Amino acid sequence: MAIARRFLPSTSLLYSFEAAARHESFTAAADELNLTQSAVSRHIRALEDHLGAELFIRDRQMVRLTQAGEVYAREIRDALRHISTATLAFRANPTGGTINLGVLPTFGTQWLTPRLGHFMTRHPSITVNLYTRLSPFEFAGDTLDAAIHFGPSEWPGADLSFLMREQVVPVCSPRLLAQLNFRKAQDLLNAPLLHLVSRPDAWERWFIAQEVDATTLHGPLFDQFSFIVSAASAGAGCALIPRFLIEDELENGTLIELVANAIPTEDAYYFVRPLSRAMSAPLGMFHKWLLEQIAGT
């Protein structure tokens, strides 16, 4: 679809507006943009003339956005961010394709990034940019081409391709194991248990799978697996962690698997992309490579 140029204000006007909206001050925007206050004021007035409505309420020496101005500011900020990201991606790889991929932090650091060198060797013309998210991914208003999502297999407006399930295992440090001498699953009821914010009922489900009655479980909360791995390695408590995220720690003895009865999680990892965009050739190559890597683990 062709872009109607008459609806596109100049970027200089938009930069002044975005800065003034963020600071709610023409003077602060002028300082940020290395302009005079009168220049920013003229830009705002020119933009308002272009739009046919006021963006700010001017009250003596104070300015504040109108209700419509607040909405417009959010949209313009997102648009400028899209342009900046696209330009950065092009400069990083002007001869090939670029993929913007959303990943969960620990999955990205522990599993994906150690393998990316192989993909880069096979496809040197493709650049993969990783963006971590703790909250659920949103493709609307974001620059992500795809994401690796852990959760249920439902995502309206998106295509989900199954990658793998997890096997979660209870682990602790050798020092804590020596102190508390765990022998069976029920012994862990008396242990300090570490919990993940996004999976608050993980221990309850694990004990149910072991046919152990666990009514009240206490312990500190962490918002990332990497924090739980560090805490468990330091002897702060026992943790339930997907085995593929701690292969090195289990191999070198930093963490000890307590009960040889891993359970699969109900949710799984999926490769997700928005249906509103066609899968590009670089993204298709990355998806194929990702499946190969998982099949080889």
Image (cartoon, rainbow, N blue to C red):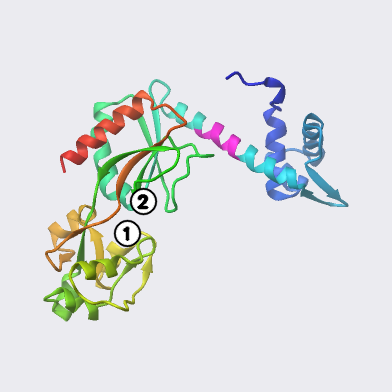
Near-viewer residue (230 or 282): 282
Q: Find residue 279 and report its image quarter.
A: top left
Decide whether the magenta segment is chiefly helix, strand or loop: helix
10 Å neighbourhood of mark 2: few (<14), some, or many (≥20)?
Answer: some
Q: Looking at the picture, does residue 134 appear above or below residue 204?
A: above
Which amino acid type is shown beneath numbered disc 2?
Pro
Q: In this view, does 214 lie to the left or right of 144?
A: left
Labelled pair 1, 2 in contact (Cβ < 8 Å)? yes
Amino acid type of the residue tagged 1 in the rendering = Phe
For residue 105, the mark is 2
Using residue 75 as the reference point, say whether residue 96 is left or right of it: left
Question: Is residue 32 something one can see in this rendering?
Answer: no
Give the x, y percent position of residue 25: 76, 49
Q: In which quarter of the image is residue 4?
A: top right
| Residue 239 image offset from top left, x and y in percent | 26, 67
Query: What residue is at 30 percent from the left and 47 percent from the top?
Result: 269
Quadrant where the N terminus lies? top right
Can residue 59 be found in the magenta stretch? no
* Residues rendered magenta in the picture: 78-85
What mark, if any, has residue 225 been given in the picture?
A: 1
